[in-house]
């Protein structure tokens, strides 16, 4: 008869003898301490931030390698600083998004997708309460998955984006829809991405915007405080308002809703800074040539997207700068 007192010891011994090595590794990883964030800002970081915003707002794409070197040196010293990690991620996003500036993009640009996913993942883990980090992390996961044709990762990024939208819809409905604007125009996911842009308008206008005959309130009458700050222009994104309507108009043209697209494009003119916007001529040209642009916007094969032809804002030299550049 087995002693009740000795039974648990025997069970434990059998378990330890038969427990596979991978089980020990899993427990060791599970028990590892979490990486903790710091909010302290070293002097070098303050200087780097000033340099970043100067070059970013001026659209100095050629300074990206220098800025990456600066922030990666900082990251080696401060791997627990979420904003340093996020800056690295965003610089890789910028380099990938505006690759048309290279003329003929280098194949190595695909590395930017992997690195933006890595560093926004770090930033999001260090500061999970910042929905911007989560939204960019999700976008980078989807961008990398598209390159490697990994459907499981595409779905992972998509559902993480939906979580980010729940956290800050005014910001991440645009972010999610923007990265999905490159999808096939006849697919349900593109339709959802376009609807996310409409929902952004609903939230910002604080009313249901008509999808067939849209009207939008004057810029001066809108509330851009709190969560609604993602709806208007700011020091970070001096032409966020104009850039939003440029992208949404492009998406509507791609869908074939040309008359509605022209109306949406025109809302960018409501901004009091429209005449100072470096891409106002691009938008006016979009309105004049919307019908001509439709077949170009529907091109899916990367090798057929040429800098010589019009292409979606997402694939253009204005992919980031349409919202962030301050001058010509």
Image (tube, rainbow, N blue to C red):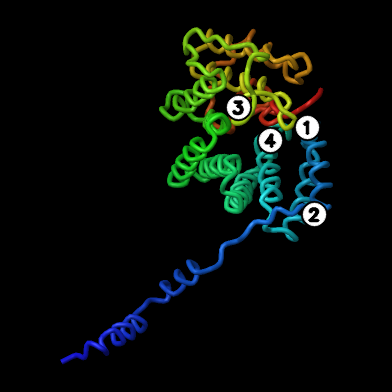
Real-space Cα distance between discs 3 and 2? 31 Å
Q: Which residue is mark 1?
A: 57
- In what quadrant of the picture does the N terminus appear? bottom left
Q: Looking at the picture, how far across and down is residue 224, in whole percent?
A: 64, 24
In terms of depth relative to the viewer, which is nearer, 35 or 111? 35
Q: Which residue is mark 3?
A: 228
Closer to the chain start, of discs 1 and 4, is 1
Closer to the chain start, of discs 3 and 2, is 2
Look at the numbered discs 3 and 2 and tell me whether their residues touch, using CB distance below 8 Å: no
Q: Which residue is mark 4?
A: 99
The answer to whether residue 76 of the structure is visible from this angle is: yes
In terms of depth relative to the viewer, which is nearer, 94 or 42? 42
Nearer the camera: disc 1 or disc 4: 1
Real-space Cα distance between discs 1 and 4? 17 Å
- Residue 42 is labelled as 2
Q: Looking at the picture, how far across and down is residue 179, in whole percent?
A: 56, 33
Look at the numbered discs 2 and 4 and tell me whether their residues touch, using CB distance below 8 Å: no
């Amino acid at each position: 008869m087995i002693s009740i007192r000795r039974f648990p010891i025997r069970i434990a011994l059998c378990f330890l003898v038969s427990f596979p090595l991978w089980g020990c590794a899993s427990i060791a990883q599970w028990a590892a301490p979490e990486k903790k964030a710091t909010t302290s800002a070293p002097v070098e970081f303050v200087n780097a931030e000033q340099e970043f915003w100067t070059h970013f707002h001026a659209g100095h794409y050629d300074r990206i390698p220098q800025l990456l070197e600066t922030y990666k040196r900082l990251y080696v010293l401060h791997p627990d600083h979420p904003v340093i990690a996020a800056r690295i991620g965003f610089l890789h996003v910028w380099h990938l998004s505006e690759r048309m500036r290279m003329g003929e993009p280098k194949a190595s640009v695909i590395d930017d997708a992997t690195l933006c996913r890595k560093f926004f993942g770090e930033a999001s883990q260090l500061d999970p309460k910042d929905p911007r980090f989560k939204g960019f992390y999700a976008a980078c996961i989807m961008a990398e998955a598209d390159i490697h044709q990994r459907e499981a990762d595409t779905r992972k990024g998509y559902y993480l984006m939906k979580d980010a939208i729940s956290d800050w819809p005014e910001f991440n409905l645009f972010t999610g829809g923007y990265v999905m604007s490159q999808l096939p125009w006849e697919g349900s996911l593109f339709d959802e991405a376009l609807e996310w842009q409409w929902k952004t308008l609903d939230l910002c206008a604080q009313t249901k915007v008509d999808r067939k005959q849209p009207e939008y309130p004057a810029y001066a009458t809108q509330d851009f405080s709190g969560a609604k700050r993602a709806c208007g222009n700011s020091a970070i994104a001096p032409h966020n308002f104009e850039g939003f309507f440029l992208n949404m108009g492009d998406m509507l043209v791609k869908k074939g809703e040309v008359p509605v697209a022209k109306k949406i494009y025109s809302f960018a003119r409501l901004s009091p800074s429209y005449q100072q916007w470096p891409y106002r001529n691009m938008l006016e040209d979009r309105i004049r040539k919307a019908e001509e642009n439709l077949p170009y916007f529907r091109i899916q094969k990367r090798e057929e997207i040429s800098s010589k032809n019009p292409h979606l804002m997402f694939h253009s030299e204005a992919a980031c700068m349409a919202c962030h550049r301050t001058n010509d």
